[in-house]
Image (tube, rainbow, N blue to C red):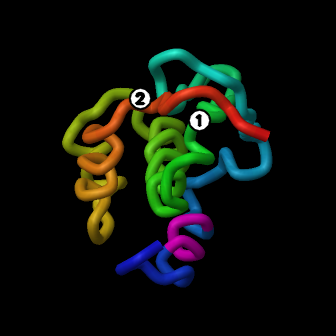
Amino acid sequence: MPGHSSRDWTALHNRSDMSWRSRSMMHVKLMKTKRGTCSVEARRIWLNLELVKKPIYCLEYIIVHELVHLLELLHTDRFTALMDQPMWWQYREELNRAPLAQGGWEY
């Protein structure tokens, strides 16, 4: 991710309060309006298949956003602090500029 090193992600992953690591599951499906969802109780994250059409750093932003929900359910100040990383708001802005679905799939 531009402006972000893999060391930063490793540090986030290795935090001692991240006990969800070995129990959480991530899935992909086509969704009409959402980019991703997180079920804290089921420890399950769903990502929208349409995200493959977005830049990789946008996908990484959505993954981190949903993972942070495993630590903080609502978009509180703590959530924002956990999300705090270089440029995350720019990735959100880029995602907000264009619709998620941009036409049919071509194979």
- Asked whether 12 falls inside the magenta stretch, the response is yes
Secondary element at image label 2: loop
Closer to the camera in the image, 78 or 60? 60
User: Where does the image place residue 63, in percent across and percent down from the top left?
Assistant: 54, 48
In this view, the residue farthest toward the front is 106
Judging from the image, what secondary structure is the residue with disc 1 in? helix
User: In the image, is 45 to the left or to the right of 76?
Assistant: right
The answer to whether residue 62 is above or below residue 48 is: below
Q: Magenta: predominant secondary structure element?
A: helix
Q: Identify residue type, mark 2.
A: Leu
The residue identified by callout 1 is 50
Label 2 crowd bin: few (<14), some (14–19), many (20+), radius 10 Å? some
In the rendered image, which residue does mark 2 sit on?
Answer: 73
Q: Residue at x 72, y 33 (%)?
A: 28
Q: Is residue 45 visible?
A: no
94 or 21: nearer the eye? 94
104 or 50, which is in the foreground? 104
Which three-letter amino acid code belongs to the residue tagged 1?
Answer: Glu
**Residue range corresponding to the magenta coloring:** 9-13
Q: Residue at x 24, y 54 (%)?
A: 89
What is the spatial separation of the Cα atoms under label 2 and label 1, in whole angstroms? 24 Å
Q: Earlier in the sequence, mark 2 or mark 1?
A: 1
